[in-house]
Image: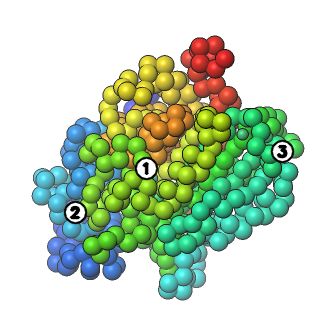
Amino acid sequence: MRLQHLRGRRTTAVAALLTMALAVPIAAQATEDSGAHDSAAAKAAAEIPRQYRVTGPDSVADRDRLARLGVSLDEVAKKSVVITADSAQLKKVRALGWRTKSLGGPPARDSSGKKVRPGVADFPSDDSGYHTYDEALKAIDEAVAAHPDILSKQVIGKSHEGRDLLAVKISDNVGEDEDEPEVLFTHHQHAREHLTVEMALYLIDEFGGKYGSDEAIKKAVDGREIWIVPDLNPDGGEYDITGGEYQMWRKNRQPNEGSEEIGTDQNRNWDFKWGCCGGSSEDPGAEDYRGAAPESAPEVKVVSDFVRSRVVGGKQQITAAIDFHTYGELVMWPWGWTQDEVTDGMTQDDIDTFKAIGKDMAASNDYTPQQDSALYTTDGAIDDYLWGDQKIFAYTYEMYPGDSGSDGFYPPDEVIEKETARNRESVLKLLDNADCMYKAIGKEDQYCK
Ligand code: 0X9
Ligand code: CA
Ligand code: CA
Ligand code: CA
Ligand code: ZN
């Protein structure tokens, strides 16, 4: 509590300084923006959206109003937010009377002078510690080859552009479907959130490599069937690093009928209360475009089908899940579609369980625990689907950094090791609870006997 308070004050002071320092460049930026053509075609061709701090929004209602303009809300503070917007969206934000301040474009990270060839998907040279899609595949294949008794890989389907979508299984007797609680980890719904793929690779390495030497790892691997979907958005991820320059891309790369705009926000496309509640956009140009129909994004359909395939003998085998995002350092739980806690499909015991385990996990990684909708309203998000439709205790993590002062979506590769290992204990806690989530509220007998 105290730490958060201090952090908040420091952020405010820095914000005040930035406001003064950046007053002139912002005005220049705005002129430049408004001079640019805002036709969808011109925008679709090239414009890299930017982050802005918007000062004023201080409630969920304010933030929802902002999100309906088609911008993404990347960071939420008490009296301001950080958004990603293109020039047309920025104009709309300003028309609502909010004060905006550019935070600049994504970092270049090519100090070594080694340039990536135009059109080639690769991280800028200073960030070569991140894995491209092919590099991640190779790392996974190597891990599976090194530990075939506890790791296996399967292709569960294809992305819009035809890349393989994988599920890595980790368990003892990995080739058999045993009667053990199953736990799902999903990664990289949003293209620019590359640290989440590193989180998947960390888990695969940690569980594979330490099985023989680490008690806690061995217990988890022996007693659970762990599913890792390391990359739900390979097309977007590759697009985001085109030519070694970060593109600030969020959605998948599926074209939209009748529009020049590309992409669906996968985390608004799941088939539970899809588009119900003002928590997504029907505009294909919006950062949170929900798609033409639930599961219209092939990647969402593939993973939904995979999850449904884990219903065996009428019982969903997966009991718990984490969907990894960046950034904000948050542990969140459903609902996203409503501010309410106890509702149809969420009993007092359910929400108490979500909170007890969520807070415990957040205590171990020093993230902030909260309900999804404390940020802003979201409908069609994965955790609402997994809980609402499949009764899987599903959490959403927002990884490092806590705020955009530390490079937002693009933290340098030097932080990968620390910021992935940071979640080791919280992941082990979820795995430990997965045999009966309700034991966290002392109701094992009532629910799990
Ligand atoms: O907006 C999102 O999808 C997530 N934030 S991000 O900056 N990574 O895009 C937050 C989702 C929180 N709500 C639910 N999970 N329902
Ligand atoms: Ca580096
Ligand atoms: Ca097993
Ligand atoms: Ca099983
Ligand atoms: Zn995200």
Q: Amino acid at mark 1?
A: Trp
Q: CA distance from mark 2 to mark 3?
A: 54 Å
Q: Residue at x 54, y 82 (%)?
A: 120
Label 2 sits on a secondary structure element that is helix
Query: Around disc 3, counting alpha carbons within 10 Å, would you say few (fewer than 14), some (14 to 19), or many (20 or more)?
Result: some
The x and y percentages for residue 144 are 79, 58
Q: Are marks 1 and 3 in contact (CB under 8 Å)?
A: no
Nearest to the eye among marks 2 and 1: give it. Answer: 1
- The quarter in which the C terminus is drawn is top right
The residue that disc 3 covers is: 173
Position of 103 relative to 272 (above/below): below
Could you tell whether 148 is left or right of 392 in the image? right
Query: Around disc 1, counting alpha carbons within 10 Å, would you say few (fewer than 14), some (14 to 19), or many (20 or more)?
Result: many
The residue that disc 1 covers is: 270
Give the mark nearest the N terminus, 2 or 3. Answer: 2
Label 3 sits on a secondary structure element that is loop
Q: CA distance from mark 1 to mark 3?
A: 32 Å
The residue that disc 2 covers is: 90
Give the mark nearest the N terminus, 1 or 3. Answer: 3
Nearest to the eye among marks 2 and 3: give it. Answer: 3
The x and y percentages for residue 365 are 58, 37
Seen from the viewer's position, the closer of residues 276 and 11 is 276
- The quarter in which the N terminus is drawn is top left
Q: Is mark 3 within 8 Å of ligand 3?
A: yes
